[in-house]
Amino acid sequence: MTRGEGEAGECLWERTDNNGRICPTWGDWDMKVVSACLAGCRCRYDQRAATGADIEAMVQSGEAIPVCPEQMGGLPTPRNPAEMVGGDGFDVLDGRARVLDSQGNDVTDAFIRGAEQALRIAQLVNASAAVLKSKSPSCGSAQIYDGSFSGRMKTGVGVTTALFMRNGISVSSES
Ligand code: SF4
């Protein structure tokens, strides 16, 4: 079932319709999870957003819910940029790689915790898909920075993306 009017014309995205009837809950339509920075939240490491008008519109219309895994994992904003060393998000989840910030601090646990919190939200709203910020060590879905803090990229996915994919949530990027 998709967001919009039902067969009888009743609303499917408000909790009640104009007659006070309870409408279907989150699980009854196709919700997506989106990166909060794409929805205009200034939650990036440098306290900036990466706003995408189409993503904002999805949130405004009730099609998507924003999450920021790094903030949800307990990291402050602003924060040092971080990159994965020794692999990508799947390797981090499996204990084969770590996430380090630009000062050498190990922030792996916060990244995993944030991914778990984001997954919790995704599962609460029964999301089967996510649109996440490209190149991020949490949200990237094709390319990530290679761990050298030199601007070089490598093939791989972020920690949250990996956890989403392992739990049956398809992930695409905004670009
Ligand atoms: S963790 Fe994801 S949502 Fe949060 S700032 Fe980074 S890319 Fe955006």
Image (spheres, grey):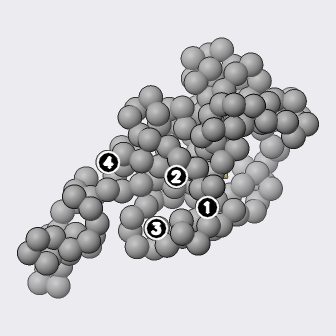
Q: Nearer the viewer, mark 3 or mark 4?
A: 3
Residue type, numbered disc 2: Val
Specify whether 43 is left or right of 14: right
The x, y position of residue 2, in whole percent, is: 27, 62
Task: Indicate the position of residue 57 as horizontal and vertical percent values.
Answer: 49, 73
Mark number, residue 126: 4
Mark 3 Cα-neighbour bin, 10 Å: few <14, some 14–19, many ≥20: some
Question: Quick one: SS at disc 3?
Answer: helix
Does ligand 1 reach within 8 Å of label 1's beta carbon? yes
- Separation of residues labelled 3 and 2 (CA atoms): 11 Å
Which amino acid, mark 1?
Answer: Leu
Task: Identify the residue position indicated by label 3 in the image.
Answer: 58
> In the image, residue 140 lies at what x, y percent?
64, 42
Decide if ligand 1 comes within 8 Å of the CB at mark 4.
no
- The residue depicted at 66 percent of the width and 26 percent of the height is 88
Badge 2 marks a residue whose secondary structure is strand
Q: Quadrant of the C terminus?
A: bottom right
Res. 38 mark: 1
> Does the residue at mark 3 contact the one at mark 2 (Cβ under 8 Å)?
yes
- Name which of mark 1 and mark 2 comes first in the sequence: 1
Separation of marks 1 and 2 at Cα, in angstroms: 9 Å
Q: CA distance from mark 1 to mark 4?
A: 21 Å
